[in-house]
Amino acid sequence: MSDSKFTAPVVQELLDSELSERSLIPSLQEKILTIRNSLRPGQQQMADWQSGPLAISAVPGAGKSTGMAAAAAIAIARQYERSSSRRQLVVVTFTRSAAANIKAKIRKFLRDNLSLPQTGFFVYTLHGLALNIASRHSDLSGLQLENVILITPTQSHRFIRTAVEQWIVNYPDVYLRLLEGHQFDGEETERLRRQSVLRTEVLPELANTVIHEAKSSGISPEKLREWSKQTTDEYAILSVAAGLYEQYQNLMRSRDFIDYDDMILAALRVLENDSARHIEQNQIFAVFEDEAQDSSPLQTQLLEILASNREYEGMNTDAMNLVSTHFPLNLVRVGDPNQAINSTFTPADPIYFRQFCEECDRIERLATMDRAGRSTRIIIEAANFALKWINNQWLATTKTNNKQHPDNRQVPFRLQTIRPVEVGDPQDNANPAPVGRGLELYTPRDIHHTVELLSQRVIELFGEDPTKNSAAILVRENRQGRWLAEALTPMCKEHKITLYDVGERDRRSHVPQEILALLQFCDRPHSPDYLKAALEALVQRQLIPTQDLNALASLPEEFLYPGPLAEPQPETVQKAARLCRSLLRARLELPLYQLISFLALTLNYDQAELATADKLAERVNQQIAGNSSMGGMLSALSEIVSSERFEPVETEDSEERYTRRGQLTIITMHKAKGLDWDYVFLPFLHENLIPGRFWVPPQSQFLGDFTLSEVARAQIRATLHEESIIPDVSQAWEVAKNLKTSEEYRLLYVAMTRAKVMLWMSAAQKAPFTWSKPDNLQEQAPCPVFPALKRQFPECVVNLAAISKQV
């Protein structure tokens, strides 16, 4: 047999075998189809996207992030198939932790389901995306990152305060008109009081509100002055706001400081340049945005420009605005307008996402993700009922106020019903069975009775094995959380339940304050006040035992360096003294720029706190570069602590920290968004907090029955919403009231939809008027939704008399 006759059949067999094996390997299209078929109907519409605009309006618990990650992975896979170009998908979300979460999910789909490289996409926060563009084109953006300092100013920030003082000097006549208010008899004591209120409260609040509102919408001080000419209010509020805004901007530029809005503006300056815009657009094949209900006008404009592949030759910023109405965009926006809970303290406004949904609906590019498997059915029914009841009440009130054609854009909720998932849904334990009644409605005697009932229910639910369940108490404000944490600590210790109070520390970092306390001690160790503050920080961090700090701090020299004739110090005092002396040695031996990092290690910070300390050190060292001294460092730190919301570095496990099993978490309703627990407790549901009362502080009532800042906000938004006229003061005040009422009700809706198997709600008959004085109890009306829920779900109302007999 010749070699050719032998090898030919063998080669043919190998080819047949290889083809057979290949046929067993699923193609990329088959893998895409497998992912798609594992999704719910609303998620599938996202996965089917190939080009153009698409709006996804999702209900709570519908699986937005999972759907977006799957759709992103499929879009990247299709891009691999159809093109050899290196264009990327850009995914934008609201927080750094959300960005890390969705990035991990996209990578998992690419690796495990599609067998593709984990590339082809970028995930950013909106500000991170803007900063990335601005830094790549620093000549166009005007941002030289090595020279500028990013700040998050608050109402008390030095720049805001200085802007107020400079405005008063530049506009004395307008200031005197504010000082006179509605009535003024010229009495000197009253004049001084009003001056103090205007300088420390009214004008800083107006400046802070308007600066954020205007900058986030691309509105200049000059534009505000133009709008002011269309108003007739006696104080010319928008003109005052324009002057404050102008002074603030001048101060920021003079010191090379920027805020978050400056990042967006800098990126838009880059995109006004034809060449730079083409470079950026040619790197992107589409933009996916999560939490779109929280976007501001400028953020929306930035994403629309990036998502468009059309030419914008010679087009200015105004012409590029709202390009979606003129050009097709490769833009997918996902959000839930019913979870918009940031618009009264940020420039975010759900009206813009609602408008995008309406535009997409007109061209049949709107999808609704209304199937949710998170909660048991009774909780879904309660949330749906609350939504419809609130909307009906709002419409009834609006018609009563002689408005025949109410503005449906301002209705608190988009009519969007949560529906349970279908049989065979891929989610494990979707729409789980309820625990107990699933929904429990209580009316305790007072807040102390509330704690008794809540404690009793927690003990029952955690049972013998607390590690199986997760639970959270959602509060409206942190003061309630602090009071509850103190009241519940003995019960949690007795029953070995971990109590985790999220509190202020996650919203405003404690790191700068602790570092400042130790540095002030290092600078002046003989000061009793500074020594006591440092010792308090060390006790708080559990580095030294709790003891009488006043006794130690009263005689710093004897405590730190006891003489040979001094009485022997107890071991607890010796430990504290040794640690304090080590801090003083470090001050002498270490260079100044290393001190903050050393103190962070001394305080035994965890990973997130160390990262926050590094961020703080970089910020301070940058700020004192021209004056590197202990005095300069202390001054910079004091400014950050007293007047800035220094944001901690987020870690990827923040959600895990809040939702651990075996843990009872106390967290605000705002912070709870995006999270869920088996059991959720909503105590203290009273009308004075939800929806709350829109009131004018007594000290500023000399200006009228309104606040300047809220009137200015409503007037600016009316103009941005393209209303025909700017509302006068009384109309603007009513608009501001409606905005707050709507947002508070949406916040309650968010809180209710965090629960999986049991939702516990209560409104005590007696509660504090203000939680700064929790012992001052008085009769309080419940949140209006609460009695409506009791009427709708009478089987869920808990009989407290029966409970008392059982006990």
Image (cartoon, helix red, strand yellow):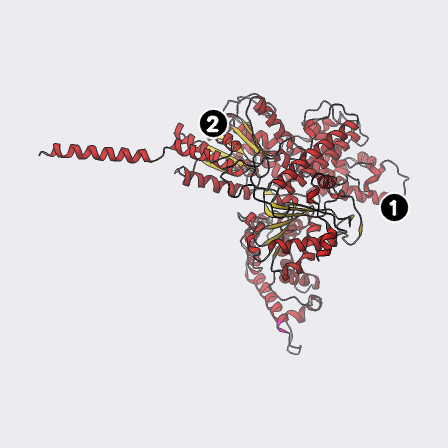
Looking at the picture, tell me which residue is in the foreground, 568 or 468: 468
Looking at the picture, tell me which residue is in the foreground, 324 or 226: 324
Which contiguous range is marked in magenta?
566-571
How many numbered marks have been drawn onto this rendered protein structure?
A: 2
Q: Amino acid at mark 2?
A: Gln
Looking at the picture, tell me which residue is in the foreground, 355 or 34: 34
Mark 1 / mark 2, whichever is N-terminal: 2
| Residue tagged 1 | 189
- Identify the residue at horizontal 65%, vertical 33% (top origin): 349
Q: Is residue 379 above or below residue 317?
A: below
Q: Is residue 769 above or below residue 251?
A: below
Q: Is residue 504 magenta?
A: no
Q: x, y percentage for residue 110?
A: 43, 38
Q: Quadrant of the N terminus?
A: top left
Q: x, y percentage for residue 752?
A: 65, 42
Please identify, in this view, whether the residue under mark 1 or under mark 2 is nearer the observer: 2
Q: Is residue 360 above or below residue 390?
A: above
Marks 1 and 2, how far apart at CA: 69 Å
Q: x, y percentage for residue 55?
A: 56, 29
| Residue tagged 2 | 50
Q: x, y percentage for residue 446?
A: 76, 52
Bin the neighbour count of mark 1 within 10 Å (Cα to Cα): few under 14, some 14-19, many 20 and up. Answer: few
Secondary element at image label 2: loop
